[in-house]
Amino acid sequence: MTVLNVAEICPATRALGPGQRFVIWVQGCCFNCRGCISPDWIPQTQATLVDPLQLADCILSVPRTEGVTISGGEPMLQAAALSELFSYLRQKRDLSIICFSGFTLKQLQAKADPTINKVLTLIDVLIDGQYIPELNDNQGWRGSSNQVFHFLTPRHLSEADLFTERKRDVEIHMRDDSVLMVGVPPHNFSTDFEGAVDIASKFTEA
């Protein structure tokens, strides 16, 4: 059985694409980009193994879901599982699908891998290229300006400016014993966030 190795999910967010989206971060990456915001998800180790069809049903069960965003980790290392996930979603509902990848579109096409090619036919927007800290322009739904938005279907073409020029923001999702940051963080976010936590903790202690 094909399974998807999942690092984390966020069932509902508006910080990684248009509308309310279900976000999946996969575990394992073949790149080691300097300044990666999710280094814990680089090791190609087992995290949570999920049946793609069961995950699809979970996505479809979340009210008001308009789309799915896949990040990681490197999603294209798990193309077979993503192919099953995306195909099933498309059969059930016409959700928007956005996918990040450290591989460029040209590199993915050069692989001539039928599974990867099928995944590409199911994606609306591919955001490609490795993160380069020096090219972080603090704009849009990408980490650095070398990364390219490929509108593989016309679904989001009318919103192209949002992808490239939108002011960045993040959402902080509180868990029982942890905090999940969702979105592409703006410059100085880590410093500002740590300062806000320090201030809040002082009020709590008082």
Image (spheres, rainbow, N blue to C red):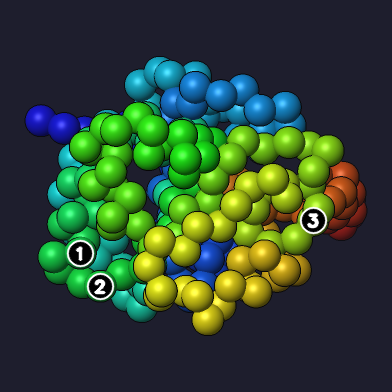
Can residue 174 be seen from the camera position used here? no
Please, is residue 188 above or below residue 162 in the view? above
Q: Residue furthest left?
A: 1
Query: The residue tagged with tag 1: helix, strand or loop?
Result: helix
Q: Position of residue 148 (x, y in %)?
A: 60, 52
Q: Position of residue 73 (x, y in %)?
A: 49, 33
Q: What is the CA distance from the residue labelled 3 to the residue labelled 1?
A: 33 Å
Q: Are marks 1 and 2 in contact (CB under 8 Å)?
A: yes
Q: Earlier in the sequence, mark 3 or mark 1?
A: 1
- Give the position of the C terminus as an image quadrant: bottom right
Residue 30's disc number: none
Can residue 119 be seen from the camera position used here? yes
> Which residue has dot 1 on it?
90
**Type of amino acid at the residue the image marks with label 1:** Arg
Residue 94's disc number: 2
Query: The residue tagged with tag 3: helix, strand or loop?
Result: loop
10 Å crowding of disc 1: few (<14), some (14-19), many (20+): some
- Give the position of the N terminus as an image quadrant: top left
Give left or right: position of 85 versus 110: left
**Type of amino acid at the residue the image marks with label 2:** Asp
Q: Quadrant of residue 57?
A: bottom left
The one of 76 and 173 positioned closer to us in this rendering: 76
Give left or right: position of 130 versus 25: right
Q: Position of residue 29 (x, y in %)?
A: 49, 26
Q: What is the CA distance from the residue labelled 1 to the residue labelled 2?
A: 5 Å
Please, is residue 7 above or below residue 143 in the view? above
Residue 138's disc number: 3
Give left or right: position of 91 versus 25: left
Residue visible at 29% across and 39% down in the picture: 116
The one of 203 and 58 positioned closer to us in this rendering: 58
